[in-house]
Image (cartoon, grey):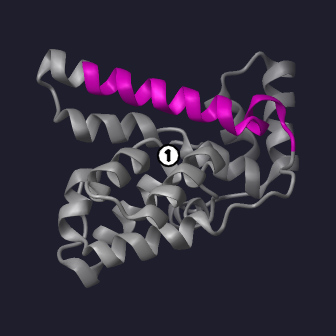
Amino acid sequence: MNLSVEALAKATLELDPLPEVSCALLQDLLEETSGLKETLAEWVQLDPVLSLHLLHLANSRSFGEPGRVQTIEEAFLVLEPETIRDALLSQVSRISLEPKPSVGALNDQYLFWKHSLACARLTAALARATDFAEPAVAYLAGLLHDVAKITLYRRHPERYRAVFEFMDRQKAHLFEAEAHVFDSNHSA
């Protein structure tokens, strides 16, 4: 099974945001207090799916040059408040309460979120310490680095079980096992 980068990217945009973040964000959207834009940006930066959606929207042809917006802060500057509100409401309304297919730790959205958030904070700290990259860009790279893994798992749970089985049988690394099963890996 060969997956194109485009197909994987499109499937990633179909993921649901985290229920915990979505509920808090929805409450803030409904209250519409002062400082709402900053509060929403803080919530969005905690969720890989919401971050990905806002970046995708801000980089669409409708809002300027595609590929120019690299951080959530920049997305909030480019997009109108109503556009941000509508996009976020659209995403949080998609939360599915249906059980997801189970494959070990990938079934635990909270563990995935903790891992993504820890990586985001670490990459931002490394960027600040080394002056290698802008911390906000590094943060997003850390937050989003494994989102395609969840996409592969959610779209192809049986095949992802085969990834873990291959890893166990062959004592293989995840990338090698994904390549064996999918002819690609989650970082492609």
Residue 172: % across, % down? 72, 21
Residue at 38% across / 63% down in the picture? 54
Residue lying furthest left in this view?
A: 131
| Magenta residues (range) | 102-125
Does the rendering let one see residue 128? Answer: yes
Q: Nearer the viewer, residue 164 or 13?
A: 13
Q: Quadrant of residue 138?
A: top left
Residue 126: % across, % down? 25, 19
Residue at 36% across / 39% down in the picture? 141
Secondary structure mainly formed by the magenta segment: helix
Does the rendering let one see residue 68? Answer: no
Q: Quadrant of residue 87?
A: bottom left
Q: Amino acid at mark 1?
A: Asp
Q: Nearer the viewer, residue 84 or 15?
A: 84
In the picture, the quarter occupied by the N terminus is bottom right
Residue 58: % across, % down? 29, 69
Q: Quadrant of residue 29?
A: bottom left
Residue at the spot of label 1: 47
Q: Nearer the viewer, residue 125 or 76?
A: 76
